[in-house]
Amino acid sequence: MRSPVHSLLFCLGLFVLLAEASPVRSDTRDTIQKRSFLVPRVKNENFQGHNGPRQLLRAYRKYSMPVPQGLEETVARQTAQAKLKARRSNGTGVVKATPIRNDVEYVSPIKIGGQTVTVDFDTGSSDLWVFTSQLGRQAQAGHEIYDPARSKTFSMLRGNRFDISYGDGSGAAGNVGMDVVDIGGPTVTRQAIEMATVLSASFVEDTANNGLMGLAFSKLNTVKPQKQKTFFDNVMPSLAEPVFTADLKKAAVGAYEFGRVDPAKFVGQMTYVPVNTSNGFWQFSSESFSVNGGTPQPGQAGGQAIADTGTTIILANPVTVKGYYAAVPGAVNDQQQGGFTFPCATQLPDLALDIGGQYMARVKGSDINFAQVSDTMCFGALQATTSNVQVYGDVMFKTQFVAFNGGNHSLGFAEHADVQARPTKLGQQQQQQQGTGEAQPLRGMVNESSAGPARAASLVLVGAVPALAVILGWYI
């Protein structure tokens, strides 16, 4: 018959074995394999300040929306004046760049085949296209160029081409190849690179624009005959979470982070809403608005909106736009400027936009004061859409921290926080990432990664207690 001491020693041995069981090692392996990484934005050294009418025109063209005649004429007049000024200033008659095009304030560096190219991250498109050595010298001037001949990992995707066009006929087209893409973390070894051989003048003149990293859904990709996956779709299996976040604050470089939702970047509880992927965009319902914290007002029944980091301004339904500017003294729909303007000295009220019927995303009034168009009048960053879709661009992201979840097709919204002021805690992260809508994100991972083995061990130990009690009872 076994003594109580022998029984106790035997059970303690089993206890240790259970605590060191394979689930802990498996969790550790997953932590090593799955990663998250951050891509900082950098200041565009050529930034000349925002141009309201120009940004509005670009937004309309991107989504092939009808363009009001007054807006077309305004931008054409500005372009002609800028070119004339450039000719006079350089004395050569050659226009190297149109200053009003340099209004993309922040861009992000990526590496393609080991070559650094600075591009604009765009959640409203699905192509990764860049300026290449296949362009003429004049088109290359002032741009960062990707040269496939300098890459040891490049391979041609023969028989495939891309063609991106906008409502005015401008766009980019060219050949397609495969190469390694690294944006600061896990790499994609075979990513489709769309190499421009033809570009419209508007792209060539914009020396800040060396290409585009599309982060919408792959069904929007323009490569033919075979559509190609976006970088996000390709890198998703390597991420600790199938998610990326846009932390795009005002007057700060900000960052895109892939693989986790950092709870130190936002305040309160993040609200998640389902995404309608039928058109390939990060699209969601948005039917109401409020002004200066007031009661929500109906906007457009059945209204849909797109979260688009590649568009600077906000295009909302006309009811929302008129309702907002009705609260702004001196605001007018200026046909000569192509949109709503107001006295620059006016203190604008905050705007809140409905996100999926579950959250009101605040946009600061100071951010809606977008650009000066005369000595006394300014152009609004809130303008009316001319189609049935709304586009919520960078102006919204200045206040809102947004998570794009590719695993369950959801968007998470919360207001920005001071990163240094809020410690990162695992329990806090788990609570905040649960969301409030039907579409729930997968769990956060970076804090779990650092505390993963200890947490897993605690689960094993807790699970071992009932078994230990049974064993002790049987032996004793």
Image (spheres, helix red, strand yellow):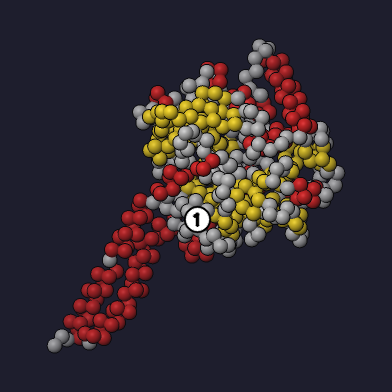
Give the residue at mark 1.
Answer: 408
The residue positioned 56% from the left and 40% from the top of the image is 125
| Residue 42 placement, left or right of 384 | left
Q: Horizontal placement of 248 versus 367: left or right? A: left
Q: In the image shown, does 291 or 63 lie closer to the viewer?
A: 63
Label 1 crowding class (10 Å Cα cut-off): few <14, some 14-19, many 20+?
some
Relative depth, front residue between 441 and 82? 441
- Examine the rendering and report whether any part of residue 42 can be seen: no
Horizontally, residue 279 falls left or right of residue 378, namely: left
Query: Residue 240 at x, y = what percent?
Result: 42, 53
In the rendered view of the protein, which quadrant contains the C terminus?
A: bottom left
Determine which quarter of the picture holds residue 462: bottom left
Camera-side residue of 426 and 157: 157
Residue found 56% across the figure and 62% down from its top: 438
* Residue at far top of view: 92
Asked if residue 354 is positioned above or below residue 159 in the image, the reply reads: below
Name the quadrant of the N terminus.
bottom left
* Above/below status of 443 relative to 134: below
**Outermost residue, front side:** 225
Furthest residue in direction left, as rendered: 1
- Residue 224: x and y in percent read 49, 33
Percent of width and height locating residue 219: 51, 43
Q: Secondary structure at mark 1?
A: loop
In this rendering, does residue 11 appear at all? Answer: yes
Q: Residue at x 77, y 28 (%)?
A: 73
Residue 257: x percent and y percent?
A: 50, 47
Residue located 67% across and 26% down the image: 99
In the rendered structure, which amino acid carries the disc numbered 1?
Asn
* Residue 62 sits in quarter: top right
